[in-house]
Image (cartoon, helix red, strand yellow):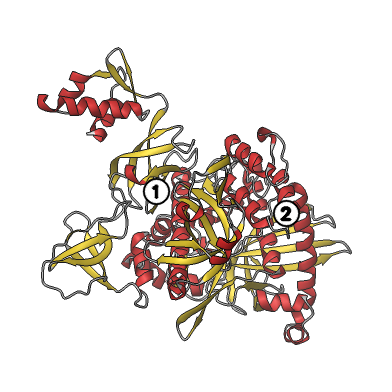
């Protein structure tokens, strides 16, 4: 009834009386009292307002359309199609049966229970998928299905077209409407089942269309005979630098010294647009996927492997078509000249971050093995250091974000380690940023319509909240309306190496908005850049492919093509977010499955958030967090000292956000991505 009322009032500007509403949505006279109670409830929630016996949608409410991008037990988030204002929080009770990937209409209150915009799904406009995943259950022989998704997963009757012998606890796929069994995936701990669940939940494509595969097969493996307009750089010393497990190599670098103090940096990117024309089947697939997805033991590429791992990939000592950016830097790392052109390169080596770092650290064996590259690598390091110092002076944010690396032995996860990042990673990062800035600046100077990589300024409210929270740690910021990224970087630098560093990093990250794609250039707050785009990874990111087409067309002197840039930016942002969440979900599942073997063990952790049910604690070294129930923390009430920070007492001990403590792993549910902790006896003793 609520959805029909909202839909009706959305179409009616002058409001409607109770009898008119009842007539419009066909409520029988005997149910008028229920309708009146519903209207009163919606009025108390701030969804409706009543003036002179007429009901209106409240001015503080908006009707938006967007994609449900995240669904976890108890809540979800919707990204509005309008693209502005950030994600909308949806409480679990207000999801209205929508699933991740669905396009929904929702009514939004500007200030929900958390003081931020909060939505309620009123209509599922388009279903993102037609199947549900869940666990097979039985009750007195009756087959049941318990969905893995949704805020309140209840068992529902399962229909089968034919008898299938299933074990209780098996993960199955059913039709979303009829609840008829479609597929049996296997037990949660069976090899590969976790990846299949994540792939289906996030609606990821695993197969290419026949048309796309046919187009890929027709692309000749040898170089085109006609190379007119393409500069031959095969005699330049170029190299790729990637991780040991990298599969697609879409960027190579080169460097030359000019005089005594200047450097000519070459960034050479695979010319994917030469092989993937607009409106082709390959282009359509790439647009729908938006990005490649990387799981620990599986890659879902944006383009067929014939392109991504072969024809476009910058393999060592094989000639490849590229688009090059040449940047001349002075001794202060200031750009003196920029040149763009289609090119032909042949990389000398496929280098890894590990090998490059060893060379830079003076490893004799690596330096002997790659003697021809040592001088160039040292020049690259010097330039990269100068670029990094310059970027830091400009106010670029430098987070020390650690990522998990899963360590396997004989196909079984043995442990979790911190993914190593060294100066070789930073070197490539600086060069790619420089190339991206150069291309974006060219677009702006030429007035070309393009897709930009933007990072909007944080909202004044979020900065004010951050400012208040940081004062509790003796860290000061200017007034919220004047806080620049450089101010935040000074805070990060002030806590580097200190016990509060991790939590302060978390607080700053929470205040920031997500970086997204947009046809409107508003700059990149985190990098402190006025102009920024993504140009350097067209094998695995669709926006980069579009940027290449725009750049090459401009270099040819042609008028800009009419491209649906707004739609491309929105689709690319959504698919990137979806892929990131899928990758994170699978890694978390596997870490939690590993932790199941350690139930009852003690761990060190950090209190990173406060929830209604207690404190959220992140375990050291495992990159996952769970709930320390309030019943474990205290017997009395929770004392709050500020909105972003909480404090509680148990006996004589105080618990604060950012505090370290020891907890016992009490419960683990990898499927629901849930951890429950209790206080360790050592922590208990500290409270007496």
Question: Is residue 472 or residue 21 the one in the foreground?
Answer: 472
Sequence order check, earlier mark of 1 and 2: 1
Label 1: which secondary element: strand
Residue depicted at 69% across the width and 69% down the height: 422
Label 2: which secondary element: helix
Residue 516: give x, y in percent of width and height.
53, 48
Q: Is residue 297 above or below residue 670?
A: below
Q: Is residue 222 above or below residue 624?
A: below
Q: Residues within 10 Å of mark 1 (few under 14, many from 20)?
A: many
Residue holding disc 2:
495
Residue 612 marker: none
Residue 403: give x, y in percent of width and height.
58, 65
Residue depicted at 55% across the width and 61% down the height: 684
Q: Quadrant of residue 356?
A: bottom right
Residue holding disc 1:
76
Q: Is residue 301 visible?
A: no
Question: Is residue 182 or residue 269 the one in the foreground?
Answer: 182
Residue 525: give x, y in percent of width and height.
64, 45
Residue 287 is left or right of residue 154, and the answer is: right
Q: Is residue 619 above or below residue 532?
A: below
Residue depicted at 29% across the width and 46% down the height: 126
């Amino acid at each position: 009834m609520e959805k029909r009322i909202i839909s009706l009032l959305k179409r009616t500007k002058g409001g409607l009386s109770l009898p008119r509403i009842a007539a419009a949505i066909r409520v029988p006279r005997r149910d008028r009292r229920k309708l009146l109670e519903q209207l009163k409830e919606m009025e108390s929630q701030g969804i409706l307002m009543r003036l002179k016996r007429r009901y209106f949608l409240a001015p503080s409410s908006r009707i938006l359309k967007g994609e449900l991008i995240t669904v976890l037990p108890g809540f979800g988030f919707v990204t509005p199609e309008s693209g502005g204002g950030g994600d909308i929080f949806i409480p679990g009770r207000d999801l209205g049966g929508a699933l991740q990937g669905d396009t929904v209409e929702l009514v939004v209150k500007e200030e929900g229970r958390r003081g931020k915009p909060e939505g309620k799904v009123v209509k599922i406009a388009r279903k993102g998928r037609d199947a549900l995943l869940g666990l097979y259950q039985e009750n007195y022989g009756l087959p049941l299905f318990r969905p893995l998704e949704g805020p309140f997963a209840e068992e529902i009757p399962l229909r089968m077209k034919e008898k299938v012998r299933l074990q209780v606890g098996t993960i199955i796929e059913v039709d979303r409407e009829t609840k008829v069994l479609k597929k049996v995936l296997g037990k949660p701990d069976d090899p590969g089942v976790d990846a299949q669940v994540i792939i289906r939940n996030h609606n990821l494509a695993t197969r290419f269309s026949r048309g796309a595969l046919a187009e890929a097969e027709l692309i000749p493996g040898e170089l085109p005979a006609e190379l007119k307009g393409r500069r031959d750089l095969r005699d330049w010393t170029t190299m790729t630098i990637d991780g040991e497990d990298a599969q697609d190599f879409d960027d190579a670098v080169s460097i030359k010294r000019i005089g005594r103090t200047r450097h000519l940096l070459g960034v050479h990117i695979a010319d994917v647009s030469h092989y993937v024309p607009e409106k082709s089947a390959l282009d359509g697939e790439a647009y729908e996927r938006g990005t490649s997805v990387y799981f620990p033991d599986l890659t879902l590429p944006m383009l067929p492997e014939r392109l991504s791992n072969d024809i476009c990939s910058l393999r060592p000592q094989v000639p490849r078509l590229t688009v090059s950016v040449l940047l001349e830097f002075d001794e202060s790392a200031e750009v003196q000249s920029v040149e763009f052109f289609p090119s032909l390169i042949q990389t000398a080596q496929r280098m890894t971050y590990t090998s490059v770092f060893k060379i830079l650290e003076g490893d004799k064996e690596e330096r002997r093995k790659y003697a021809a590259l040592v001088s160039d690598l040292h020049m690259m390091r010097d330039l990269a250091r100068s670029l990094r110092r310059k970027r830091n002076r400009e106010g670029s944010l430098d987070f020390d974000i650690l990522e998990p690396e899963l360590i396997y032995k004989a196909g079984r996860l043995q442990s979790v380690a911190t993914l190593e990042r060294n100066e070789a990673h930073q070197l490539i990062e600086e060069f790619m940023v420089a190339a991206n800035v150069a291309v974006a600046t060219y677009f702006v100077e030429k007035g070309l319509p393009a897709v930009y990589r933007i990072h909007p300024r944080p909202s004044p409210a979020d900065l004010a909240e951050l400012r208040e929270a940081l004062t509790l740690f003796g860290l000061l910021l200017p007034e919220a309306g004047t806080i620049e990224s450089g101010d935040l970087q000074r805070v990060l630098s002030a806590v580097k190496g200190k016990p509060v560093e991790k939590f302060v990093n978390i607080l700053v990250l929470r205040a920031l908005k997500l970086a997204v794609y947009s046809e409107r250039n508003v700059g990149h707050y985190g990098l402190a850049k006025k102009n920024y785009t993504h140009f350097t990874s067209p094998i695995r990111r669709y926006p980069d492919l579009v940027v290449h087409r725009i750049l090459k067309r401009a270099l040819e002197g042609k008028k800009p093509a009419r491209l649906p840039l707004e739609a491309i930016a929105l689709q690319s942002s959504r698919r990137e977010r979806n892929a990131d969440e899928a990758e994170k979900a699978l890694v978390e599942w596997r870490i939690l499955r590993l932790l199941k073997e350690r139930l009852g063990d003690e761990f060190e952790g950090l209190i990173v958030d406060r929830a209604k049910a207690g404190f959220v604690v992140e375990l050291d070294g495992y990159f996952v967090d769970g709930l320390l129930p309030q019943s474990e923390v205290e017997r009395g009430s929770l004392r709050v000292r500020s909105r972003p920070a909480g404090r509680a007492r148990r006996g004589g001990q105080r618990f604060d956000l950012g505090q370290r403590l020891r907890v016992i792993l009490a419960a683990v549910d990898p499927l629901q991505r849930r951890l429950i902790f209790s206080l360790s006896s050592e922590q208990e003793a500290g409270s007496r």
